[in-house]
Image: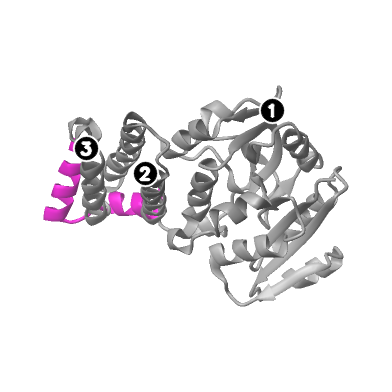
Amino acid sequence: MIQVAIAFPTHNGARFLGQALQGALEQTYEHVRVVVVDDGSTDETLDIVGQFGVGACVRRSRLGLAGAWNECVRLADDADLVMIAHQDDILAKTLVEQAVDLFDGSQELGFVHCNIDQIDSNNVVIGGHWAPEFQIRSGRSFVVPRDVFFARLLDGTTPVCCPTVIARRRLYEAVGPYDERFGCATDLHMHLRMALAGDVGFLPEPLYRWRRHPAQASAQKARVALYDERIRAKLDALRLVSQTGRFSVENLKSFRASVARDCVQGARRYATGDPKQARRWLGHAWALSRRAIFSADFAAGALRAAWSSAFGPTDKGRARALGLR
């Protein structure tokens, strides 16, 4: 039987951790082991883990995001499939069972992700999936070929809600650990590498409740910094894909053009708050695709960056860059 590990990297997660652990322990699929990696919590996190009788719990001292996730994978050494869930979310009882069924049908499948409901601190649903092509909420699960999904990951906002991912452990062994250089985009960087090595499945039923609240890690970082981490993750993926030798020149041009669009869109969006960063993105766009300079976003980003460099960032621009509006 396929063995599954659901791992929770935790840090001061006492407020919602009980709900997360309960969902993991109530999975209808029998062969599930729950793992907790506590990253130096100072609240009641460990007490809650003890209340739920989770035997596999290790405590580390501030590994950071990528480090904690890598420790989760390491501790799941006896599992065939690994899920790294978030401490403040809620898993539907049939999530693992449905994912295993999809894995059973395809040996080429590298990882599976699922549809979501976004919830607030009171468990009230406040939204669904952000990607239009994954807003279907019923029907049969499906598999996307690896190269098609890799191209999609490069093009705009990722369609993967990272804690819903259930991946073959051998895929982690093949592509290597989470890379701490990319901060909160370490998941995107991992999914890009995984998509080069295996097909990707999707479960259309919303089987994961993804909580949005001010204390979560991504909410604590400036928007412009998050955007830059995603750009850097994609730039590194372009470096990796160029080394595979399996894509045509036209494919590679298309990949570079996708990332160039992200760069110029970021420059347009954040130039009045951080003109220096906007100029760096415009430089990346120019290097990736000469056609980028003919886009309206490139022109707007360049003009706004020049204006902000001359007269100083605007209050509205700073607020946007920091994520305050």
Q: Tell which of 249 and 309 is nearer to you.
A: 249
Would you name the residue on which mark 2 appears? Answer: 242
Horizontal side of 47 relative to 318 (left or right) equals right
Please name the residue shown 84% across and 67% down the image.
Answer: 55
Amino acid at pointer 3 = Phe
Quick check: can you spot residue 215? yes
Q: Reply above or below: 313 against 296.
A: below
For the residue labelled by badge 1, is the local secondary structure a helix, a strand or a loop?
loop
Residue 231 placed where, x, y %?
Answer: 37, 48
Amino acid at pointer 1 = Ser
Would you name the residue on which mark 1 appears? Answer: 141
Q: Earlier in the sequence, mark 2 or mark 3?
A: 2
Please name the residue shown 69% across and 37% down the image.
Answer: 107
Label 2 or label 3, whichever lies nearer to me, is 2
For the residue labelled by badge 2, is the local secondary structure a helix, a strand or a loop?
helix
Horizontal side of 301 relative to 49 (left or right) equals left
Q: Distance of mark 1 from mark 3, alpha carbons?
A: 39 Å
The region drawn magenta spans 299-325
Q: Earlier in the sequence, mark 1 or mark 3?
A: 1
Horizontal side of 112 relative to 94 (left or right) equals left
Please name the residue shown 58% across and 52% down the image.
Answer: 174
Would you name the residue on which mark 3 appears? Answer: 298
Amino acid at pointer 2 = Ser
**Magenta-colored stretch includes residue 89:** no
User: Going by the picture, which residue comes out furthest to the left?
Assistant: 310
Q: Earlier in the sequence, mark 2 or mark 1?
A: 1
* Quadrant containing the N terminus in the rendered view: top right
Residue 323 placed where, x, y %?
Answer: 41, 52
